[in-house]
Image: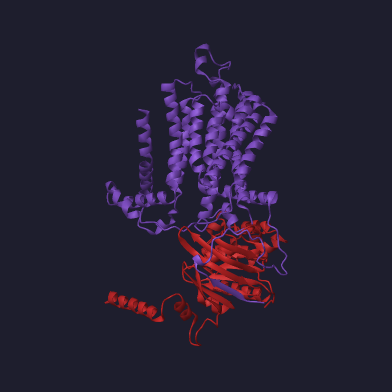
Chain colours: A purple, B red
Amino acid sequence: MSGVSVVSRDWDEVIDVESMNTQSLGTSAHDQQLHEPLRGWEAFSTTFRVMFKEEGRKSLEFAKKRQMVLFPLLLTLVTAITTIGLQFLVGDSSAQVADIESKTFTWQELRFALHLPLLMFSLGMGTFAFMGHDAIVHRAGTKNYLLAAPALQPLPNSVAHFAYFVKDLSFYVMLILSPVVAGMAVGIGLESLAGISTPLEWSSLPWTWLAMIITLAQGLAIAFFASALWMRGRPFTIFGPLLVVALGVGIGLGKFDIGSMLWGLGVQSSQNIFGAVLALLASLAVGLFSSALIIDDFDVSVVERAELFTPIYNRLGFLGKGEVRLIVAKEFVDLIRSGSIKKMTVSYSIPLLVLLGMAWLVDFAEAPIPINLLSYAPFLGFFGFNFYSWLTILDTPEFMNGLPLRVPQLIRAKVVVYFLATSWISLIFIVLMA
Amino acid sequence: MVESLAPLVKAEDMAKKYGDFIALHPLNVEVHAGEFFGVFGPNGAGKSTFIKLLTGQLRPSKGRIEVLGVDAVADPQKVKANIGIVPESESPPSFLTPVEFLEFVAKLRTVENLHEQVKHWIEWFGLEEKRDTMCKDLSKGQRQKVMLAAAFIHKPKLLFLDEPFANLDPIYQRKCRHWLLEHVKNGGTIFLCSHVLEMAERMCNRMAIINNGKVLAAGTVKGLKKSKDETLEDVFIRLVGHSIKDVERLSDQGAKDKDIEEE
């Protein structure tokens, strides 16, 4: 038999029964020998290598070649200077005198100050499930990334996501952590060359490097896990934020010791190699588990919506009649339709809520807060950074090339949107604090 | 044409719904080896959904799909490993060069003589000068050539092509057309989606016309025509719901509007 048969039926003619029938439909590959798709390690290593290259190129485009080289050098220089200045920061330095002793930090406090911002940074950078979804949705746009490759190639989405997680971890280790440790080495090296004193010892460098990698891996894995759960929808989208707030309050009440939650800090303090390997493997395991939560879903939903642009534009009368008002209205439609407004509100509100809880605990419950409130600055900073990133990557701006608009107008519109979208949250926060 | 009892592709009541919008009504389809089968329809008719469901890119809302003896819903990766897909509007990864992307695809598909194959397809599509240029810096047509090369590199017998010649210049359109026709002559099977009716006339031995997610008619290109004088365009307009007079009336109105503007 040859040929083609194709017949349509009405939607209601076919009863929607979850078919348990596993019997073959009778197709055949004939003389073609079927290939098994690459799976496991082979699929991972093939994808990882190309993704690493892709990341390098992306960074080069974002920062240009000179900045790409200068950034690690700058990190090395800053860390070297900090290392030299350590004698004035730590309490047990021979350089300090009695009257400033109370103003210095212990080694443990300094380590904490190293690991907490690093964890916050990695939490902000590890939402790989969101990134993967965005890559798949936008794969027909002007930019396409390897993270979207499973839509077309015989590659499981979970493998692509795990490769992305390991790639990001490796890239940050190479671009940020290694230059930091190199800076420490330069600082120590100056002791013998220039006679500058530092309390840091050579033997602590490998541990610092390893401990920072563990903290970074832990943060990326937790954020990956949270985003993977979020993508699975309810009930995770409800209980996830509640859990984060509860955790913050728990830390504030002293129910959980945040120090013990920072695996890297624990490793650096104990210098236990078994603990280090275990912590690293645990982070990778969380990453692997998170990637297993990613399903092979390449649907780009087709949804009809009521018009939003004109109603929003009409409400923005205070912006005048110029182009900025038009762009702001368009940006708000983007924000609402893409669902980003929900994600951004949650990510902006959670640190503020935690901070509010902390303030309440200090003022009313008189609870001993283990964390300096200033530690929340990077926390807020990174979430704010994410917020702004989301705001600016919503839609490709290329279509504006053909419109009579100027770049400053676009930037002004983005700033206005940022202000309008966040100021009410901050206002509520200040009122509550008051 | 290769004669065989079992079809290569079969779907039973395959359908897709997005919320309340029915993108594809339940559809039964069988494609046998050696066919050059084309699905044609106006923009938004459901052609791409049709092809994405058969190739495991989308999960059906209803029904079952089997390709080359593999359940496309349960094991879409195995289906993708054994077919070639050219998507309608997808580009190769922006930050890889054509050579790097083809090497990646060839490795995933365990292609033998990987470097030779990559070199062959780069030359075949005339991309030698662009082999080390990142795909984001290629023209649309060049990106389409890379996507075509990625679909051909593992020599699949079964190809799914969605608007494959979009943005290609006439020289490469002709080159690809000849290659595809040779492929079918040698026992290959092609499933093509397009709105360019000329492709049906030139390439397909069977075709279907689809609109609003439903197949309106299917058969040989000759068989769909009511008379000798009827063109495929006439058939298309007749089937998708507009009479020829309607179209002429719309054209005349357009011409009148133009005259008024000029006056």
**Is A242 situated left or right of B56 in this image?**
left
Q: Is residue A247 above or below residue A322?
A: above
The residue under the point 57% across, 39% down is A220
* Of A302 and B110, the residue lying toward us: A302
The residue under the point 48% across, 20% down is A368
Q: Is residue B142 visible?
A: no
**Is A275 situated left or right of A119 in this image?**
right
* Of A406 and B117, the residue lying toward us: B117
Image coordinates for residue A98, horizontal then vertical, percent: 52, 11
Q: Is residue A416 above or below residue A207?
A: below
The residue under the point 44% across, 30% down is A355
Q: Is residue A21 visible?
A: yes
* Of A315 and B176, the residue lying toward us: A315
List the single residue furthest toward the top: A98
| Image-quadrant location for residue B170 | bottom right
Image coordinates for residue A294, horizontal then vertical, percent: 58, 48
Image coordinates for residue A345, horizontal then vertical, percent: 42, 41
Q: Is residue B130 above or below residue A290?
A: below
* Of B37 and A161, the residue lying toward us: B37
| Image-quadrant location for residue A176 | top right
Q: On the rendered image, what quadrant is the C terminus of chain A found in? A: top left
Image coordinates for residue A426, horizontal then vertical, percent: 38, 35
